[in-house]
Image: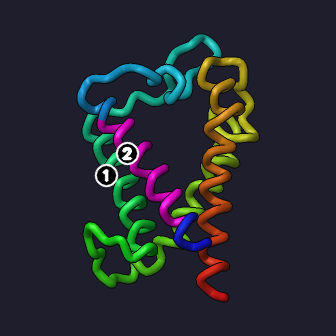
Amino acid sequence: MQFIFSVLLFLVFLTISILHFYWVFGGTKGLNKALPTNEKGKRVLNPKKVETTLVALGLLLFGIFYLQKTNLRLIILPDYYFFRNLGTIIPILFTIRAIGDFKYIGFFKKIKNTEFGKFDTKLISFFCLTIGIIGFLLIYIEQL
């Protein structure tokens, strides 16, 4: 079970990372659904290419972390405190993302009737919560 969950999370993070790199290199498909807007349709986040690149690299790192749990290693992450605790940090981050900021993102957002708000409610928040749950399940499985 650990192998399946780890490969699944690797593939998820790899896919999301590739999507972010696509946006860095000028792609626009899906961007309107990926960035929150206010009620008037104006974006409340306007990430620059550097910021999007950092997110893409972070997501790729998360994927590599989970790939290492399968022993199918492309890159061996060093045994630093940060990397040892990444298995706890990732599910916490994605669970917090699913809960949201109580205004624009997450299950408890107030602004729900924008294109992003509807997509976030239908897919992104559930997706983030699922990542969080699978990450916590992996922690549990490792402790057995």
* Residue, disc 1: 57
Q: Quadrant of residue 72?
A: bottom left
Closest to the camera, between mark 1 and mark 2, is 2
Name the amino acid type tagged 2: Ser
Does dot 2 land on a helix, a strand or a loop? helix
- Quadrant (top left, top right, bottom left, bottom right) of the C terminus: bottom right
Closer-to-camera residue (35/143): 143
* Residue, disc 2: 17
Q: Within 10 angstroms of label 1, few (less than 14), some, or many (20 or more) residues?
A: some
Residue displayed at 74% across by 30% down = 110
Residue displayed at 72% across by 35% down = 109
Residue displayed at 31% across by 71% down = 73
Residue displayed at 69% across by 43% down = 126
Label 1 vs label 2: CA separation? 7 Å
User: Marks 2 and 1: in contact by CB < 8 Å?
Assistant: yes
Q: Is residue 75 above or below residue 105?
A: below
Magenta segment, prevailing SS (helix, strand or loop): helix
